[in-house]
Image (cartoon, rainbow, N blue to C red):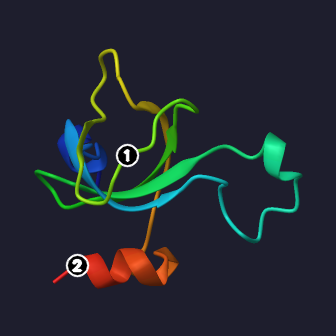
Amino acid sequence: MEKTKDKMERTEKFEDYAYVLDFLPYGHVEDKRPIHKREPLAQVIGERYFTLLEVSVKRERNPLVMDRLYIGKGERDVVNRIKRKLKFEELTPSAKKELP
């Protein structure tokens, strides 16, 4: 029995906006690289699907907790790129406290 193509396709849900839960100006503490080589990161939650994401932040930007950031496919003011999806357990303690 063949699976239909519709069942095999996975629908991707993309966020356009997200709210900052935590800002890590020097990246992760566990990162072994020298501080000047680390990239600033933010842990965010998507506005529409509540997706937990880690994003790379442009060096000249310092987003505050609960700032609304554009993370869609167009030009972004604050975010360089979306690095990865996060599980709740991967959030920093500060980010966890921002969630209800």
- Quadrant for residue 88, please give it: bottom left
Disc 2 marks a residue whose amino acid type is: Leu
- Quadrant for residue 14, please give it: top left
Q: Residue 63 vs residue 37: left or right?
A: left
Residue 68 seen = yes
Label 1 or label 2, whichever lies nearer to me, is: 1
- Which residue is identified by label 2? 99
Task: From the top left corner, tell me how far across and down residue 50 is, in percent.
Answer: 19, 61
Task: From the top left corner, tell me how far across and down residue 54 is, in percent.
Answer: 47, 54
Secondary structure beneath label 1? loop
In space, the residues marked 1 and 2 are separated at their CA atoms by 17 Å
Q: Is residue 4 above or below residue 71?
A: below
Disc 1 marks a residue whose amino acid type is: Pro
- Quadrant for residue 98, please give it: bottom left
Image point (46%, 75%), residue name: 91
Near mark 2 (Cα within 10 A), the count class, few <14, some 14-19 or many ≥20, is: few
The label number, if any, that marks residue 63 in the structure image = 1
Image point (20%, 35%), residue name: 16
